[in-house]
Amino acid sequence: MAHFSEILVSFFIVVGGIFGLVGSFGLVKLPDTMRRLHGPTKATTLGVGGVLIASMLYFLLFEGKLSFHELMITVFLFLTAPVTANFIAKTYMHLKVKPSELPETSTEYGWAGYDDPPVEVTEQSEKK
């Protein structure tokens, strides 16, 4: 049983390392910001997730304790990585892409940030 446990923990460490390496390679080698987003948000997240799963399995199988620290880190990572990527992509779009270059949307609202009506300054909003 101990031999199988070592193989299982080692497998997740190796898989996490491979994903981390591929994500880092993509971050360095891909040519522009929008393509570079894919490396750290997808592959590296899976890499860190693999190492955290290996850590949880180690503490469960060898120490006999269930560790929730790694689970909380994984949840935090999976929740924040897409949000961060979305903010970076929207910033890139506002700095580098003209509204005329964007494709038409299927909704009546258009692209958020480009088609929002201008905010009118009134006396009420100035007092706040």
Image (cartoon, helix red, strand yellow):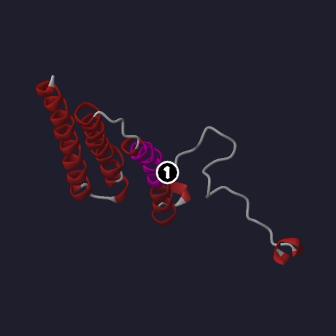
Q: Give the range drawn in magenta.
A: 72-86
28 with respect to 82 (left or right): left
How far across and how far down the image is residue 26, in percent? 24, 51
Q: How many numbered callouts? A: 1
Tell me where residue 33 sits by quadrant. Answer: bottom left
**x and y, in percent, of residue 54 in the image:** 25, 38
* Placement of the N terminus among the 4 image quadrants: top left
Above or below for 110 versus 64: below
Residue closest to the far front: 64
Q: 19 and 61: which one is in front?
A: 61
Position in image of residue 91 (x %, y %)? 49, 62
Picture layout, residue 66 above or below residue 3: below
Assign a secondary structure to mark 1: helix
Q: Identify the residue at horizontal 29%, vertical 44% (top origin).
A: 43
x 45%, y 61%: residue: 92
Residue under the image location 52 percent in, 63 percent down:
94
Magenta stretch, main secondary structure class: helix
Q: In the rendered image, which residue does mark 1 sit on?
A: 83
- Image x and y of residue 63, in percent: 26, 37
In the depicted view, which residue is nearer to us: 26 or 114?
A: 26
Residue 5, placed above or below residue 97 = above
Q: Looking at the rendering, which quadrant does residue 100 occupy? A: bottom right
Check disc 1 and give the amino acid type.
Val
Q: How crowded is mark 1: few (under 14 residues within 10 Å), some or many (20 or more)?
A: few
* Residue, far top: 1
Q: Is residue 16 magenta?
A: no
Q: Is residue 1 left or right of residue 79?
A: left
Q: Which residue is drawn at 22% across and 34% down?
A: 62
